[in-house]
Image (cartoon, rainbow, N blue to C red):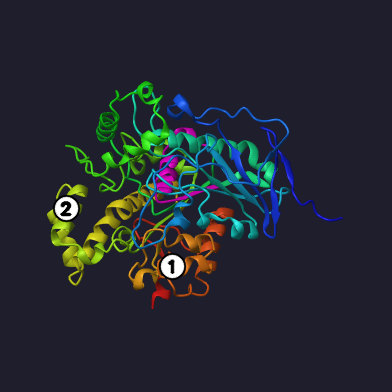
Amino acid sequence: MPRQANPVVETLAGAVRGLRDRTGERYRALPYAAAPTGAGRFAPPAPHPGWSGVRDGTRPSPTAPQPARDFGRLDMTTYFGPGWVPGGEYLTVDVHTPATGGRRPVMVFVHGGGFVAGSNRAALYDGSAFARDGVVLVTVNYRLGIPGFLDLAGAPPNRGLLDLLAALGWVRDTIAVFGGDPGNVTVFGQSAGATLVGALLATPRAKGLFRRAIVQSGNGTGAFTPEQAQRVTAAAAAALGVEPTAEAFAPIPDERLLTVLPALTGLDLRTGTATDPLSGLSPFSLVLSVQPADALAEGPAADIDLLIGTNTQEGHLYLVPQGDLESTTQADVLAVATRAYADPKTVLAALRAARPDATPGELRSAVLGQVLFEAGTTRMARAHARISGGRTHLYSFGYPSAALDGRLGAAHTVELPFVFDLADEPWLHGDADLLGPAPAPAGLAARVHGAWVAFARAGDPGWAPFDPQRPTVEILGEEEAG
């Protein structure tokens, strides 16, 4: 008997029709919460009312309101996706499953984009390789920017994080009908998505929602203090000419909320007790009194297997495409360090001593990488290792992209094609594309993707756990650099 061309699955909210391909079945635009419109944009995620009949799960959903992102000479559309695709019902997930029968490991991916952009529609997040290898992949959309993360009186903080909790609740309650095991869920994310995953580890409400976590180039110390968040809120309210309350923001359309984002760029968020954990690159982050890396004991972290790491030249993404790696001056290096460190001159002196041949641009990149990703990653890895009993695995990804005349290097985001086993795709291989014109090294994608899958299955990526007394870091890709 021929296989059904368009499979239909019955969920708690209603029936949904998907598409079958050579790697399994795809179900798109599945709502895990009600559409966040009007005042609902500043409220906790509400249950979706469900539907009658068979829902079309063959087309992608709208995306969260977001500005266009420009990375100079580097084409980042494969990372950010189509940008803002208007429509109220964007609190959705896509599911790519090998088949709807059985109980397979589940991986839930949280996209990056500086807390202001991105969606699960990005080409880099295609789940074919995961489904091919017996994993059910779920990719999540969540609220961004002002609706997701602006701290407003009368609204719960960190609404984008609340969305992820709701999505994980949906996975717990629903993923079995898609062939997934709700008792074996790995949540993983990159960049802002990784920072959100780190926050889940320290969130009491997240207990029981997942068994493992992967943090790719996140920041366990990247949250704003309430005082810092209020500076952003005051600036946004002033730009809009309204009071800094959820009630005042509720009638403002999304289009207008986006127009004020440039006014929030470059705010001085340094306070008497905190530096800017994002070095001015985004006016939005989590808002917490205690950094996730310092609050792991409050959440499920002690019971969670953790795979965590960074790329070796993270900061290059923010300098090379714009030509700033070459044009950076010593004054620029001091300026970025001053945002990030209480004693920037001492930090820079140590960095120069360690890298005596580094150009000002390379030093600036190193500062950005350390502040945005490396320091918070190390702090979280050490904290998790202390409380989890050897369930922490650390990696460093060092394959240098050949993009932009070979200068992009092992920059932020370069590991993603290898995690999703897409590194041979032609659309990643022009000079302005993420991996540049050179072919991907043979076997690296299989190694990286295979480690992620193995970790999701059983908590072991294939190398020794991290021990703070004898740090073990798995090097991925540096041997391919020559």
Q: Between residue 202 and residue 236, name the one nearer to us.
A: 236
Q: Secondary structure at mark 2?
A: helix
Mark 2 or mark 1: which comes first in sequence? Answer: 2
* Furthest-right residue in this view: 1
Q: Quadrant of residue 437?
A: bottom left
Q: Report the magenta residues as a range.
A: 186-207
> Which residue is painted at 30% across and 24% down in the image?
242
Name the mark on residue 182: none
Residue hosting label 1: 435
Quadrant assignment for the N terminus: bottom right
Q: Are marks 2 and 1 in contact (CB under 8 Å)?
A: no
Q: Residues within 10 Å of mark 2 (few under 14, many from 20)?
A: some
Instruction: Tell me: residue 426, above or below residue 154.
Output: below
Q: Secondary structure at mark 1?
A: loop
What is the x, y in percent for residue 39?
45, 24
Q: Is residue 451 magenta?
A: no
Residue hosting label 2: 335
Q: Is residue 77 left or right of residue 178?
A: left
Cα–Cα span, label 2 and label 1: 30 Å
> Which residue is painted at 31% across and 62% down in the image?
316
Which amino acid does the dot numbered 2 rest on?
Answer: Ala
